[in-house]
Image (spheres, helix red, strand yellow):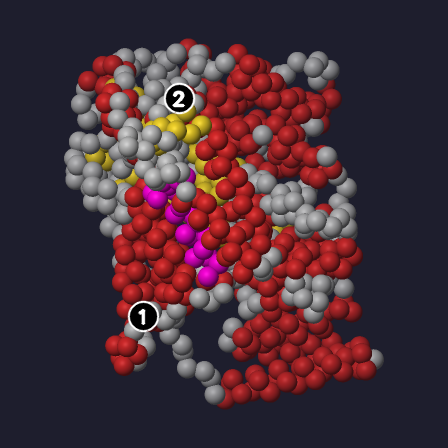
Amino acid sequence: MVEGLLCGARSSSREGILQALLSGSREGILQALLSGSREGILQALLSGSREGCPEAAALLWSLQAASHELPGSPEVSVCFANRSAALFHLGHFEVCLEDIARAESHGYPDRLLPKVLLRKAECLLCLERLQDAQDILSVLESKIALDGVMTTHLTRLKKLSQLKVKLGEKERCPEPAREEHGGIQGKPEIWEENSRISGASSSLSLSFDAERGRHLVASQDIVPGQSLVKEEAFVSVLCPGESLPLQDGATAWDTRATNADLYCHRCLRQLLASVPCHGCSYAKYCSQDCADMAWQQYHRTECSLGALLLTLGVFCHVALRTVLLAGFAEVSRLVAWSHCGDKNLQNPEARCKPLSEAADSGADSRGIPGCGSNGWYQSSYQALFHLLPHTEEHSPEHKFLCTLSVVAICKQLQAAGLEAAVLNQESPQQRSKTKTCEKTSDELSPELKTVAEAMLRHMLQLQCNAQAITVMQELGPGDGAVVDKKPVRLATAFFPVLSLLNHSCCPNTSVSFSGTAATVRASQPISSGQEVLHCYGPHWCRMRVAERQQLLHQYFFKCRCRACLEELESGVKSVVSIRNSFCCPTCQAQMQGEEDTLCCSNEACGTSASKDHLSGRLQDLQQQIKKALDLLSVGKADQAIKMLLKCQIDAGTFLSPEHLLMGELEDHLAQVYATLGKWQEAARHLKKSIEVVEMHHGPSSVEAGHELFKLAQILFNGFAVSEALSTIQRAEGILSVHFGPQSAQIQELQEMKACLSELPRNILQRT
């Protein structure tokens, strides 16, 4: 039950977690737990060696069990202390010290304190904070001396004497300052913010017309990779994510972890040492500051509603958090404006000119919805409120469900005595209990009706304006030499400025995320006067025009972008249809036809085949590929290779050589050979995969960049120096356009390049 998960009694099966974790391999489990690779967690936990790893037990305990203990209880303090041991083992000394401080503040048992103080001194020693380490060692000596039972501290006394020796050596011979190699910095981006559009580049201007609505236009020529928008989400809500199923036979305990366990619920940073909410078992934060900020802004209201919000869905949650962040005064002002139809929000008494006149007035953006009286478009609640809800377009059923969800939330707010907190953002101690007691009617108060109206508007807006915040997550355990990643939806958010970008199936921008911040970059040259366009999902490289148009129905417009017009008006088959076609089983020519029976395009052959039969073969092939990858995941690489090679032969009999699945097969084979350390074979297959990817997505696409990144890793590990350097340069050029010079992948490429460049000249000449 959801209620049991979020709001039930705080309890944890620590013994079960510990028992299960003790069977895992030490390093693999610890790194997987901290890395956020959920598949890696399961793999390390359930197929590791029998050595035992109590630090890993402590870490997973923190991820889940700590959230279920009572705040301030000894159990919570022990949990933080145990997690600090795992963090120390992995070298995260600063975060380890934070957890030790948390353990002490939650009343860590005095009898166990010497163990934690030793760890604290070791951390300080590793961080070169010698005086602080000396002070802690003095406190520790005093504590052990006062205990009286010296035999219980023999091991600690030995460790203490060793630390004092180390401390003395460091004081006499301090280590020379080491150069930092891990933080290779790219060239800083040139950025000049727009004076009239917050978070937008000065190279953009805001326009409006009846057909395209509000949209952004280049006011000067723009080059690929240039940053166009940098915006913090007005509101974002973490999507819980899917739980991983337990492996066969693992019924005694639950190792499932989701995004809710791995990312901060406020800033969306990856969690290393989470700080749980003191009121519920769901919310987790990266620091106490984030926890306090979330509590002040919205979580004190949401805390007891967790189960209901999770049940009603993320759109309902975003709508509630939006009004909480905006504040009731601003919400009621804009709702009142929407009733009177006044377009001038800064001056409710005055009327501004019609939007059509505003559109004809040239560069002046006064009168454009969402702009203030000064013509500025801010990333604000006012701009968000003006995003189109398309009320007349939604089905009655959808509007009814949205209304029902909003009423359920408002009823719960009223029943739980949270109305005052919503309206005035009071602290729980300041809430007036008399107001709640006086209310005998089931009807919502006028103020809550205003909140409900705003929430309903936002829920309807989200269908066309919700932005998925994505993060690149590793596929598999993430402990191999070649790391494969895929984008995963992390949160749903409102970005008022990003929402100004209209859709195109062939966009000229690329969007990336860092925490709750979005960055839009030009993915190709944009001429002055040209509209800046973003892809809402359906891309001309990935699906046919009919499929794209079907998916775009949810946005209540018919796409008329260049790619759609060319396919619809010329009647020419899309690139996707041509390249992902079936080929003749007899002569390998392309099969063609739109009916149930496909015919060979080679008139001399004349072979025909059922479309359903070929589609069935394709599905069977995909199932076989999945089985091969399952074999790889359990360490049966040789069997996986045999099965994939068999799949490749089968695919060649009925799929076009350019079919995307043919490229995927080459990619999977490269992955298996890399696992075995056969770098040349891996590189050979990956190069074939890159050829197919470039045919489908283009040589400068983000997909090609990711494949080149993997090839660079393989060549680096295979010591093919000159080829690795040239591949790194290609990958760097593509990925910097889409993600910027400071992205993690660019940093890793630069580190590989620096490592290879430092090799002796005679080695470089031989490779």
Q: In this view, does 575 lie above or below 409?
A: below
Cα distance between the residues tagged 1 and 2:
52 Å
From the viewer's side, name the closer residue of 271 and 506: 506
Please give left or right for residue 240 compared with residue 376 in the image.
right
* Location of residue 456 with respect to 218 vertically, above or below: above
Check residue 552 for magenta coloring. no
Residue 538, percent from left and from top: 38, 31
Q: Answer with the quarter of the image where residue 726 lies.
A: bottom left
Q: What element carries label 2?
A: loop
Asked where in the image residue 78 lies, by quadrant, the reply is bottom right
Task: Answer left or right for 58 relative to 347.
Answer: right
At label 1, the amino acid type is Val
Q: Which of marks 1 and 2 is nearer the N terminus?
A: 2
The single residue placed furthest to the front in the displayed view is 604
Q: Answer above or below: position of 190 versus 717.
A: above
Predominant SS of the magenta segment: helix
Q: Which percent across, then down, holds residue 739?
A: 34, 49
User: Which sits in the foreground, 20 or 176?
Assistant: 20
Q: Where is residue 352 in the image (x, y as percent from the top left)?
A: 29, 15
Residue 695 disc label: none
| Snapshot quadrant of residue 539 | top left
Amino acid type of the residue that numbered disc 2 sits on in the rendered structure = Glu
Query: Where does label 1 land, which residue?
Result: 721
Instruction: Tell me what residue is drawn at x 19 percent, y 19 percent.
Output: 361
Q: Can residue 65 be seen in this view?
A: yes
Question: Residue at the spot x=47%, y=15% of the render?
Answer: 394
Q: Residue at x 41, y 61 (%)?
A: 682
Residue at disc 1, secondary structure: helix
Left or right: 569, with 624 as reference point: left
Q: Which mark is residue 595?
A: 2
Task: Give the left or right position of residue 445, taking residue 732 as reference.
Answer: right
Q: Give the range drawn in magenta.
A: 654-673
